Image (cartoon, rainbow, N blue to C red):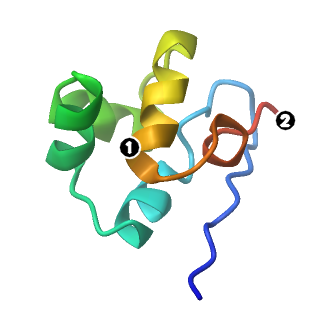
Amino acid sequence: MTSTPVVQHRTPGERGHGLRAMRSAAGLTATDVAAAIGARASTVYNWEHGRCRVPEDQLAALARALGSSPEESVSYT
């Protein structure tokens, strides 16, 4: 059984922190995730590296692409 990593953040601006681990655990590339949510792979990379925040309107689609819930995909703490 594979467990989904829980994403914890150091600051509110790091909403994407931990997404790479979740994406990798799901066996997906950034291009796969981007295609699933209608974004560019560079956008997914930027979220993963904390260069920009995942928009709230993308959270549900991102969670579906990663096979998790929005709460598991993103922590607001």
Q: Residue at x 63, y 76 (%)?
A: 3
- Mark 1 to mark 2 CA distance (whole Å): 22 Å
Q: Residue at x 59, y 88 (%)?
A: 1
Q: In which quarter of the view is residue 77 placed?
A: top right
The local secondary structure at tag 2 comes to loop
- Residue wearing tag 1: 65
Q: Residue at x 48, y 53 (%)?
A: 67
The local secondary structure at tag 1 comes to helix
Q: Nearer the viewer, residue 40 or 38?
A: 38
Up the image or down, 1 lies above or below 76; here it is below
Q: Nearer the viewer, residue 44 or 60?
A: 60
Q: In which quarter of the view is residue 46 placed?
A: top left
Q: Amino acid at mark 2?
A: Thr
State the image coordinates of residue 7 (x, y, percent, origin top left).
67, 52
- Residue wearing tag 2: 77
Q: Residue at x 15, y 44 (%)?
A: 31
